[in-house]
Image: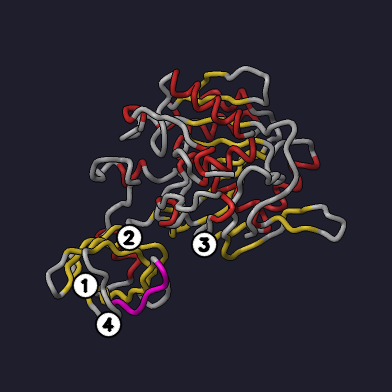
Amino acid sequence: MKKSDFHFDLPAELIAQAPLAERSASRLLVVPPAPAAFDDRGVRDLPALLQPGDLLVFNDTRVIPARLFGQKATGGRVEILIERLLADNEARAQIGASKSPKPGGRIALDAGGEAEVLGRDGEFYHLRFHLDEGLESWLLHAGRLPLPPYIQREPGVDDRERYQTVFAKEVGAVAAPTAGLHFDEALLQALRDRGVESGHVTLHVGAGTFQPMRADDVRDHRMHSEWLNVGAELVAQVRRTRERGGRVVAVGTTVVRALESAMRTHADGTRELQPFAGETRIFIFPGYRIRSVDALVTNFHLPESTLLMLVSAFAGRERILAAYRHAVEQRYRFFSYGDAMLLWPQSDAPGDAAHAP
């Protein structure tokens, strides 16, 4: 299976550069199993498309203002993208510089303070920040929001609100779980009035999500590590939903990756969702059967991306590519600030095969 099997042509003007005035005003492409027709709807139609007793699962991670700028002692300019906050004002980060900084080197930060380079592990650097306050609180006023590279403008004041979900709580992501951006309080209330329940997992989206897949053969790709938490309360909610005949609907690919990482296989081959907190490198692509969810709300993803491969595993590669062609023809808005899809699984899903968590 080649990376190029997941290519599609996208006119640049369909890449959304800013959010709509209202979160829930986005369009929603409903993709039922083939051969049923695609259905052009709106996100506000979700309550009518779901049933009482269904469970929506959201990712409650909160985006860190993780982008910093500074200068090395030699005068060279440096851009820092924090990947993960660590203890004692330390962090794992990517560094953009004309010449890689060496261990022991210090970077004078434009916003004040210094970052000391402690070491390097592959593409990530281990930094210690010398500040007058804790790193997390300092970033809230000193850091800049790390908008995706395909948004070709500097972050504005509005992005601090709009590049967070309304239920964002657990600080730690460097990119938003973008399917959740469509949900405002009015839509959430309409879903509650419909009898649709909601639950939350946490998966801190890492800087690796912005990195293109470099391997030509999909099976050679190694995913970046991300931290997740699927709590006992959510596991109980899922169990109750299944028992009453309801459906589990993931809001975003990060929720699917979290839930699939928390699935455990019993001796008889059956799989069950269990509480789990820790790291995952799970890479889901066609050949893997997603068992944790019954439907998926998701944005439109980049060509040849791991996220496009995940939705292809769920709904079928040909079905997804046909839906994307339809979306281009109908002028849907793509990527983080774009429109959404409601996907139902392909009816003849193959057996399990994937890279492990």
Q: Amino acid at mark 3?
A: Ser
Coordinates of residue 78 in the picture (x, y in percent)? 22, 64
Residue placed under numbered mark 1 in the picture:
107
Res. 225 mark: 3
- Secondary structure at numbered mark 1: strand
Residue placed under numbered mark 4 in the picture:
104
Q: Measuring 51% from the left and 44% from the top, which residue is drawn there?
A: 3
Nearest the eye: 188 or 257: 257
Residue placed under numbered mark 2 in the picture:
81
Q: Amino acid at mark 1?
A: Ile
Q: Is residue 212 left or right of residue 108?
A: right
Q: In the image, which residues are magenta?
A: 116-122
In space, the residues marked 4 and 1 are separated at their CA atoms by 10 Å
**Neighbours of disc 3 within 10 Å: few (<14), some (14-19), many (20+):** some
In space, the residues marked 2 and 1 are separated at their CA atoms by 13 Å
Residue 149 higher or lower than 192, as above or below: below
Magenta part, dominant SS: strand
- Mark sitting earlier along the chain (1/3): 1
